[in-house]
Image: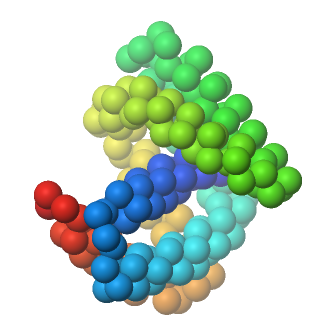
Amino acid sequence: MTKRTVATCVMAVMFTLSAMVLNAQQPNPEMQQLYQEYMTLNQQLQSTQQKALNDPAIAKKSEGYSAMLDETMNEISPQANGLIKQRDNLLDNYEAAQAGNDEEAMKQIEQDFQQLESQIEPIRQQAIQQEDVQKKQQELEADVIEKMEEIEPKTPERIQRIQILQQELQKMMPGQ
């Protein structure tokens, strides 16, 4: 995945979990504590992942995967290209708003991003069901995780813990 694709995935997960916690009637202290731990681990993993993605070999593989995914999405839906461009513009705008500490703009961009992602996600899901895309994605993920482990040996434990936290948080949500 390119840095842009990784950023998209990270933003989508963070927005979803934030919305889950915020939409809970009264998040209890245990839920808040789990969410805080999740966010701390997420930041640590993101930092390590970013370092791994800066490796030239990983970056090249990531670009190849991203190009394949975009191409497959465009084959599935003619509107995919326009949606991807809109998403990239939103991410650029978000970075600018973040740099300028413009909280109001950031909130609006987050809402717009979520709406746009709801249009992109079904197309992405169809694309990643393709066998060749799945194979390329698995190879890239393995390479990224291997590089992350080289950079930070605690990576496997952090990944395992964040998965457990995500499951626990989902169980605590009303209606789950």
- Single out the residue that lies furthest toward the left: 175
Position in image of residue 93 (x %, y %)? 75, 39
Position in image of residue 34 (x %, y %)? 37, 82
Of residues 22 and 62, the one drawn nearer to the viewer in this rendering = 22
In the image, taking residue 17 as reference, residue 98 lies left or right, namely right
In the image, taking residue 118 as reference, residue 52 lies left or right, namely right
Position in image of residue 7 (x %, y %)? 60, 52
Of residues 148 and 162, the one drawn nearer to the viewer in this rendering = 162
Q: Quadrant of residue 85?
A: top right
User: What's the colour scheme?
Assistant: rainbow
Name which residue lies at 59% across and 17% down: 82
- Single out the residue that lies furthest toward the top: 78
In the image, taking residue 152 as reference, residue 79 lies left or right, namely left
The answer to whether residue 124 is seen in the rendering is no
**Up/down of 107 relative to 119, above or below:** below
- Single out the residue that lies furthest toward the right: 100
The answer to whether residue 58 is seen in the rendering is yes
Position in image of residue 68 (x %, y %)? 51, 32
Name which residue lies at 62% across and 40% down: 108
Name which residue lies at 66% across and 65% down: 50
